[in-house]
Amino acid sequence: MTLATWNIDHPVYGTRRFRAVRDYLLALDCDVLILTEANAALELPGYTSVFSEVSPFVRHGRNYKTPNRYHQVAIYTRLAMHRVADVEDTNGVAAHLVEPRLLIYGSVMTIKDRWADWSDKRYTDRAREQCDVIRRLQRPRFLAAGDFNFRGHGTYNRVGALQVGALVADCGLCWPTQTEGRTVQHVLHGSDVRVSYEVVEAGKLSDHPILSTRLYP
């Protein structure tokens, strides 16, 4: 099974970039896509999708008019899935894949509160919230991926790396991207899942590369 994680930076419906992102995602030919800074207007033929709650982190000058709808996280798949109903979150969404049997969680440890005058939360709060959700959901057939907003052993948002490290140690999760310095996107998985990954540059379509992941039986 193939899975790609990518921050697509909310492409606006009807624009050249929107069409280019759509075509690129289809060309990836992945079974599952975890997209962050997603737009619910993005429809991919052959895929069904679930989204986190509508994001309150709107940016001045960005077009959010219908049919655009901004979400922190989306899961797209061409496999049979159903949403996990008790995960209602702005920064995460969960779904069960039927075959192969797998619980997937798409996550953002957001930094956007620093630009939101209505919020008193910090990055450390958001990282802790996401770690708490992962702690609750984790099991042997589990995978979490998304934009964690820190890189490998870098100093930027190091508190997030420390919190994820503690989570991994406590729960016995695997963290193949722990030392990855090319992207802030990460993947965690349970003991009954085997994973390999590569970082793929996406040109000018996004400031973020794609985290391309392969899961083995």
Image (cartoon, rainbow, N blue to C red):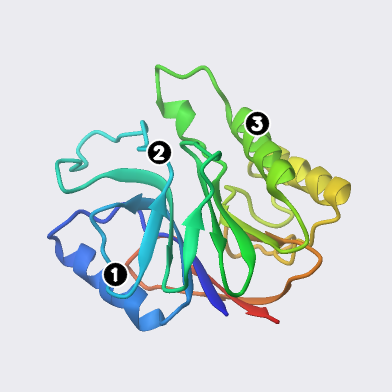
Q: Give, as a three-letter code, the residue at label 1.
A: Leu
Placement of 123 over or under 7, stated as above or below: above
Of pointers 3 and 1, the one earlier in the residue sequence: 1
Residue 137 drawn at (x, y percent): 69, 47
**Nearest to the observer: residue 147 or residue 96:** 96
Which residue is drawn at the image coordinates 64% and 44% (left, top)?
Answer: 156
| Horizontal relation, residue 19 to residue 213: left or right | left
Residue 131 drawn at (x, y percent): 69, 41
Residue 85 drawn at (x, y percent): 51, 43
| Horizontal relation, residue 117 to residue 3: left or right | left
Q: Is the residue marked by circle 2 packed among few (<14), some (14-19), or many (20+) residues within 10 Å?
A: some
Which residue is drawn at the image coordinates 16% and 66% (left, top)?
Answer: 16
Mark 3 falls on what kind of element? helix
Viewer can see residue 120 = yes
Q: Name the residue under label 3.
A: 124
Q: Give, as a three-letter code, the residue at label 2.
A: Glu
Choose top left, top right, bottom left or bottom right for residue 188.
Answer: bottom right
